[in-house]
Structures are given as C-alpha cells and as structure tokens.
C-alpha cells in the first residue's frame, strides 16, 4: 500500500525536487512550498521510492493535500 507525503501548509508548489523512481530517506526534501513569500521545504517522513507525483510546479495546494505517493 502506497504511503503519502502531504502539504504541511497552504501555499503554492514552488519547486518539485524528486521524480517517479527516486529513492528517498527520512528528511529528504521532496518539494518546496511558497506561502506568504516564504519558502518552506517538504520533507519525507519515511524512506521509500516515489511512485506518483500528484502536483505540478506553481499549483496551489491546501494544508493536508497529498503531494506524492511512495512505497
């Protein structure tokens, strides 16, 4: 069953740092969100391999919205 990395703030996806197939570890920065002119990194909370990228750069996201799936 796939695990999910979610947005921890409401904002815009400024940069996506990983792609499908990338291996991640706990603490890996997977994306950077921009909110109120501040850049906030989104870090993986577990290790695995990215299976799905659910967002695109410049997309608006809400807190709790899924950004990536990984196994």
Image (spheres, grey):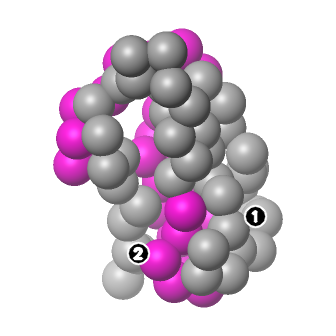
Closest to the observer: 32 or 23? 32
Residue 34 located left or right of residue 1 = right
Position of residue 65 in the picture relative to residue 53 (left or right): left
Is residue 34 visible in the rendered structure shown here?
yes
Q: Earlier in the sequence, mark 2 or mark 1?
A: 2
Residue 30, quarter of the rendered image = bottom right
Residue in the picture at 56% in, 31% down: 39
Q: Where is residue 26 shown, x and y percent of the image? A: 60, 81
Residue drawn at (68%, 68%) of the image: 28
Tell me if mark 2 has few (under 14), some (14-19) or many (20+) residues whose alpha carbon lies within 10 angstroms of its own: few
Magenta stretch: includes residue 57: yes
- Magenta-drawn stretch contains 19: no
Q: Residue at x 73, y 45 (%)?
A: 17
Secondary element type, mark 1 = loop
Per the image, the residue denoted by label 2 is 2
Q: Position of residue 36 (x, y in %)?
A: 39, 16
Examine the rendered structure and indicate whether residue 3 appears above or below residue 20.
below
Quarter of the view holding residue 62: top left
Residue 56 left/right relative to 7: right
Q: Can residue 12 be seen here?
A: no
Instruction: Tell me: 45 left or right of 28.
Output: left
Up-down: is 69 above or below 42?
below
How many angstroms separate mark 2 from mark 1 (CA)?
Answer: 13 Å
Q: Is residue 57 above or below residue 70?
A: above
The quadrant of the picture occupied by the N terminus is: bottom left
Name the residue carrying label 1.
21
In this view, 31 is above or below 61: below
Bounds of the magenta segment: 43-71
> Label 1 neighbourhood size at 10 Å, few (<14), some (14-19), many (20+)?
few
């Amino acid at each position: 069953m796939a695990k999910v990395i979610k947005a921890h703030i409401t904002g815009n996806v400024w940069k996506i740092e990983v792609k499908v197939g990338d291996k991640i570890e706990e603490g890996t920065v997977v994306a950077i969100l921009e909110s109120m002119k501040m850049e906030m990194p989104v870090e993986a909370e577990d290790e695995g391999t990215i299976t799905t990228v659910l967002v695109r750069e410049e997309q608006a996201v809400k807190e709790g919205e899924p950004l990536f799936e990984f196994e």
